[in-house]
């Protein structure tokens, strides 16, 4: 999305209609729990000669990817159906870990309140299975915050294709020109950019250079990052200016 000269990509969405959020790694730092679930299950089948997968392998081959991509990366010699069944079993393991240990990304509550106070529409857009998505939102106390939950596996194609984000726009009845996104992965960032919206990438786990290459409009450490609040204040100022002109 091209912003007018001198205007940041986020401020260019004014008047803002909606804010979209990924879930895993964006609302909650869930990747370590996914990593542990994969580690334990892969060790149980003797994967990688019994050597646990490290974080670099996890980020490169699994994090932010659709189940089909992850299954093909992990088990290129297996029938896809067998790989997908392994991932389904892994999700059961992940949910048991999440119920004990899921934590929100730092500062999330403040951003949630900012979105609420402005009355913007909001949707969660994820490649996670719906059962996982709904559990995570429940554990985070956000079930009632989102007006829609869009699951990549229920779309024509999951992220990094733009379809999940395009479906969110349609369900909320808003336009790409007046919507922005919070993401944490290169895959999700590419999906948002392809759908025509600026993406704020949260540095939960993924390398900053991969998010830059994916086209993130802004990269922040977490929701307490002063860079983020500077951008949100710019939106507030632009909204106020628009209202004063229209008054």
Image (tube, rainbow, N blue to C red):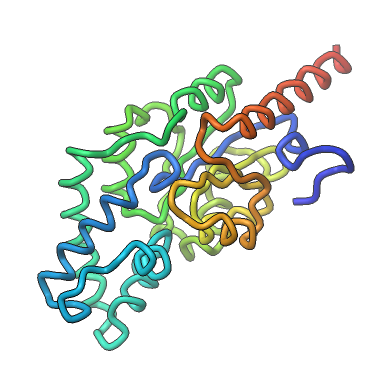
Q: Looking at the picture, how far across and down is residue 181, in whole percent?
A: 58, 43
| Residue lying furthest top | 247
Q: Looking at the picture, how far across and down is residue 9, in whole percent?
A: 74, 42
Instruction: Looking at the picture, tell me which residue is in the foreground, 50 or 211.
Output: 50
How many marks are shown on the rendered structure? 0
Q: Quadrant of residue 85?
A: bottom left
| Residue lying furthest left | 44
Q: Looking at the picture, how far across and down is residue 43, in whole percent?
A: 14, 70
Q: Is residue 9 left or right of residue 134?
A: right
Q: Is residue 164 left or right of residue 133?
A: right
Residue shown at 63% from the left, 41% from the top: 180
Q: Quadrant of the C terminus?
A: top right
Residue shown at 53% from the left, 59% from the top: 186
Residue 105, above or below 129: above
Residue shown at 32% from the left, 49% from the top: 130
Residue 88, above or below 94: below
Instruction: Looking at the picture, tell me which residue is in the foreground, 172 or 72.
Output: 72
Q: Is residue 233 left or right of residue 55?
A: right
Residue shown at 68% from the left, 48% from the top: 217
| Residue lying furthest bottom | 77
Instruction: Looking at the picture, tell me which residue is in the foreground, 209 or 30.
Output: 209
Q: Looking at the picture, how far across and down is residue 239, in whole percent?
A: 75, 22
């Amino acid at each position: 999305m091209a912003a007018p000269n001198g205007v940041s990509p986020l401020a260019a969405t004014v008047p803002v209609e909606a804010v979209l959020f990924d879930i895993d790694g964006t609302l909650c730092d869930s990747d370590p729990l996914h990593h542990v679930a994969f580690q334990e299950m892969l060790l149980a089948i003797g994967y990688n000669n019994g050597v646990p997968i490290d974080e670099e392998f996890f980020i490169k081959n699994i994090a932010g990817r659709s189940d089909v991509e992850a299954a093909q990366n992990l088990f290129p010699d297996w029938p896809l159906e067998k790989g997908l069944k392994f991932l389904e079993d892994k999700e059961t393991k992940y949910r048991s870990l999440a119920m004990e240990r899921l934590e929100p990304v730092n500062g999330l509550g403040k951003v949630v309140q900012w979105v609420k106070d402005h009355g913007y529409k909001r949707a969660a857009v994820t490649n996670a299975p719906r059962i996982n998505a709904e559990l995570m939102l429940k554990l985070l106390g956000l079930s009632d915050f989102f007006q829609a939950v869009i699951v990549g596996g229920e779309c024509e194609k999951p992220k990094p294709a733009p379809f999940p984000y395009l479906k969110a726009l349609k369900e909320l009845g808003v336009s790409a020109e007046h919507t922005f996104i919070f993401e944490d992965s290169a895959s999700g960032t590419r999906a948002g950019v392809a759908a025509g919206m600026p993406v704020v990438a949260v540095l939960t786990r993924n390398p900053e250079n991969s998010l830059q290459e994916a086209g993130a409009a802004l990269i922040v450490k977490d929701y307490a990052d002063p860079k983020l609040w500077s951008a949100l204040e710019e939106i507030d100022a632009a909204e106020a200016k628009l209202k004063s002109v229209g008054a």
